Each structure stands twice: as structure tokens, then as C-alpha cells.
Image (spheres, grey):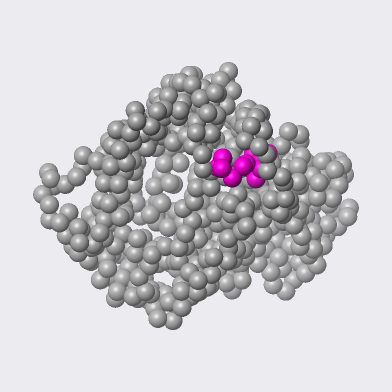
Amino acid sequence: MICRLAGVITDRPAEEAKALLSTMIASLLHDRFVVYGTYCVPQLGCYLGWVGDADGDDEPVIDETGRALIFAGEDFSSGSAATPASASNTGGDRWLRDLNGWFAGVLVDAAKKQILLFNDRYGLHRIYYTQSRGLLAFASEAKAILASQPRTRQLNAAALGEFVAHGAVLRDRTLFEDVFVLPAGSAWTIENAEAIEKRSYFAPQEWEAQSPLTTVEFFDRLESTLSTIVPRYFSGTRRVAVSLTGGVDTRRVMAFADQAREFQSYTFGGIYRDCFDVRIAREVASACGCGCGHETLRLDREFLRNFPTYAEKTIWITDGTLDVGAAHEVYLNALARRIAPVRLTGNYGSEILRGASTFKPLPWSPRLFRPDFVPHIEEARRSFAEIGTRHQVSFAAFREIPWHLGSRLHVAQSQLTVRSPYTDNDLVALAYQAPLQVRQASKFWDRLLVRQNPRLASIPTDRGRVAGGAPFTTLPNRLYNYALFKAEWYHQTGMPHWLAPIDRRAPRALRPFFFMGSHKIEHYRTWFRDELFEYLESILRESSDTPYINAAAAAETLAAHRQGRGNFVADINRIITIALIERLLTRHVADRIDRKPTIEFESMLRRRRQIAAVC
């Protein structure tokens, strides 16, 4: 399948446009398992490129009239919506509304002298763009623009303030000057670089206007919808594996899966022991009769030995929108690709169906930042309330998931194809009709699982809950699991400053390893203090002139963490991330691109077939 795309619309000479496009494509070649291609229509000033998965078989589609469609991502609509013919036959934006998935694309109609740039209604497949006189450049990743447009290689202080305050850049801004994100549900008609009709083919208000259903009606519709849509996400010619956890969202996917089809499953595990996710997932896989079994993919010492590589790759792949404290995502998803090129998850189920949210302002230390930058962080914290919407599902689908959670999806997508049925258009539309009392009613969701697969329902979750179980019988397990969860949290992210010296001075044999790894597989507080300290120190030393960080305060904070004078893992995570963003994406982005292969315009790397009208 096509994973990423890039394009230049310009009135500049063809050779100059090709040089820009070549640089953009080169920046998108992250791994050895990708192929690329180009498609150009010089008479329209249109120069396009794409990067695809070598295991896939999708390529740009060109029909008999010369219309060409480069479609990145996947479409799970019931028909064949993602074709030039469907765009022509359906007319207007109807064909875009029929698409169902995470995608972006370009439709070129040489006869009409028009180019259509579009993305999915949630904006989960990001398209970055910049405009200047006689030029529109766009790509699936911001670094493609940074590499080809030197004027954009500087950070936007207001956007960086949002990243510090919330862990995400809000609205359609990016971390970089004059680089923006295509708004969700966009359909831009382009005649040339300066004649662009910017419109949207979908607005959340359409779903918000639906009438609520009764509890009985909603239950019946939900059961029917899940039965219809979940099998779609197991479809296709490529191998699919399910990423299981100890929660209920992936379990619900398994309950509605097509049990006639064999598929693999796996769970991410940690260094110290099998966490609850691993132990429970094995039971879930057994209860569903996965024909190919279940595996544990471990975050092991190899990850720590090569942490610099994974940390920098995380910043590079996500254009700085995911911090180094999530570097394990690259490592684990690379392991997952060895099992299957498609990873099916239960991600976003709690947000869409039950209103769960982790998107909120984060604590921060003003002394770590330069005085002239601090007001940008303070302003970002004050403006957080403005991003709320009048509907809980709209906040989840069009704010939290694409802005806050989308970066983890993006880093996973760099290694394999990720799917989740919980953003299926049919299911999200239905979620708007849930009665208010249902969204937080655990008994309602228990009944859905019990009815579909009683054996799955009988397996306790990672919090010790059993669907439909009597509260007094499950109370001991729930208390035990909760105690381990809180103990591990307080030993890692949540450790109070006063406890850190005691933990540091405790003999190794007396440290609380008996609960480490019970719930979490990553332990950055202790890793930053011990195994990773030298690397972190080197990054701060090399980044002492970063214009946003108070270098002296940052070095003192890292030393205090090392010596056990407090728990500064969140502060260190943030300042190391900013230092790497500055180093990799503004100062040295061109150097990294120079080491990429030269793009060939008369042929495609590992080509499968010739594309008409290739440059």
C-alpha cells in the first residue's frame, strides 16, 4: 500500500521542481522495506511522489481518460470508492464522503486542468504544507518540507509552547514556521500554486445533529454495527495480527472477529516480568481460538543499548510531535512487523465509546526555559479550554485522537500498517447517538461482551474487573491490581521528590522490583537515572545554545535526577525532546537528507510496473 506522499505545485522550471520533489521523497524513505515512485504532469506544474510498503500491491491508479489518483492509506468503505472512476461517477464531494479510513490523496484531472488534494475526515493521515510565491509544497511528513524549503527551518515559539504545555500542537499549526497541517476533511481544488479553492467535505456538526437513541435501540445498533465492521479490518491479502492488551477494547474486537479466519496475536511485554497485559492476552487469545497462537514481544536490554538510535528516530519520524519517552514504540512496532505487516488494535475505543481522555495540560517548570519563551507556554495553558467542543465524541474524534494520540499512531505506521475499527465512520456516527447514561455505564458494555462471547467476558481485565461479575467477588482482585498499579506509578512517573533519595540509597536487593513491570513495560525514571544518563548528558552538552532551554537549569535538573535528589523524569523528557527537535529538524535536517539515495525520475526503485506519464 502507499504509505506517504509528497507533491509540488509550481510554475517554476521542471528541473527545479523535480529537484525539490526528489529531496522531499528522499526524506520519506525511513526503512529498507519501502518502494517509491513519481508521477508528473508538467503542463499543470504538478510533480508528485509516493512511498509505499514493499509488501503491498497498491500503486497510483490511472484510468483510460488520464485521471490519476495517488491514494495513501486504506479505505474500508463497502464499495470501491478510492478510484478515479468513482470520483467522476459520484460527482462533487460525495465520493470523498463515502471513503472510510485514515488516508490522504491527490486526484489529477489533466483534461479539466485541476488537482484535488484531500485527507480523511479526522485528519489522522497528516498532510503538511507550505505556500510561497508560485509554489505549493505538501507531504505526509513535515521534514519533507523542511528539507526542500530552508525558510521553514525554524521553530514556531507559540506552537512549541503548546507542545510543552499539552504534549501536542493544537489546531492546524505545526512546530515550524510557515508549515501548516491540512485541516481534517479537506478537499482543496488546485488550478495552480496560487489559485486554490480550500473547502471541507465534512463537518462534525452533521453527526452532532443526530437524535439520541434509547438504550435498547443503541444496544441493537451497536451490536449490529460491530458485527458488520470488525471483519472489514481483517480483510485484504496481507497478513493481519491483533495487538492484544489486558483491557476490554481489543477484547471487544476479538469477540466480533470472523473466527473462521486464522490470525496471529501478540502483546508487548517488558524487561522485568510478564505484565498483566501479557498474562491476560494469552487467555484472551486462547478463548478466541486464534489459529496461529500468541506471542510476547519484549522491550529488552537491546532497546536500552540502542536507545540513542530509537530516540532520534522517534523525533525524526514524527517531526518532533512525540517525545523521547515514547522511543520504545519504534522498537516494538519493528518487532511486530516481523509477525505481520498489518497490526490491528483496539486503540481509541475508550475515547470514542466511553469518553475516556488523557488530553489535559501538563505540569512544567518555568526555570528550565528561557524567560522570553515562558509567556508562550503560559498562553498555551490558558487557551486549552478553547479547543473543547460541545460534544464529547467530537472532542475525542476530532481533537484528542488526531492531535494528542496521532503521533503514536504515526510512529507505529512508519514500521507497519495500523488499523482500528473504533474510528470507522459507521461506529463513530453511532457513538453520537448513545444515551448519556450509557457511555459511563460499565454494565452496558459488559452485557455486550457477555452476549457475544461469554468466555471472553469471564477473563478479568488488567484492573481485575470481570464483565458481569458480582462486585463483592471481584473486589479482592481489583484491590490487588489497583495497589500494584499505584505502587508502580509512584515508583516511576509519580514518585514524589522526597521519596527519590530513599529509593536511590536503598540497597539493590531491597528495591521494589517485586511490582516493577506489573502494569507498565517502560520505566524511564530509573532508565534516565541509570542506563541512559550518559546519552542524555551528551545531548544537553551539545545543545547548550538551544534558544528555548535554560541550559544551566537543565544540566542541574539532570544531575539532581541522577543523584536521586528528586524525580525529574517529565522535565528531562521534555528538554531532551526539544533539544533533539532543534538539532535534527532545524539545524541538520539537510545533512540527514544528503545521506539518502538519489531519486530516479525515469524509473522506480524496485518497480513492479511502469506508470503512465511518469516524469
The tally of labels here is 0
Between 330 and 7, the residue placed more toward the observer is: 330
Q: Is residue 571 left or right of residue 359?
A: left
The residue sitting at the bottom extreme is 372
Between 227 and 300, the residue placed more toward the observer is: 227
* Quadrant occupied by the N terminus: top right
Q: Residue 15: within the magenta? A: no
Q: Is residue 296 visible?
A: no
Q: Magenta-highlighted stretch: main secondary structure?
A: helix
Query: Residue drawn at (46%, 72%), measured in percent from left and top?
Result: 377
Residue 581 horizontal/vertical position (percent): 45, 64
Q: Is residue 136 left or right of residue 497?
A: right
Q: Against 69, is 469 above or below?
A: above
Q: Is residue 191 visible?
A: yes
Q: Is residue 563 left or right of residue 425?
A: left
Query: Residue drawn at (80%, 67%), measured in percent from left and top?
Result: 195
Between 280 and 613, the residue placed more toward the observer is: 280
Query: Residue drawn at (55%, 56%), measured in percent from left and top?
Result: 403
Q: Quadrant of residue 514?
A: top left
Q: Which region is colored magenta?
A: 426-439
Residue 105 horizontal/vertical position (percent): 70, 50
Q: Is residue 559 left or right of residue 338?
A: left
Q: Quadrant of residue 35?
A: top right
Q: Residue 430: within the magenta? A: yes
Residue 218 horizontal/vertical position (percent): 64, 35
Q: Against 472, is 134 above or below?
A: below
Q: Against 194, is 73 above or below?
A: above
Residue 49 horizontal/vertical position (percent): 67, 52
Query: Residue drawn at (61%, 58%), measured in percent from left and top?
Result: 389
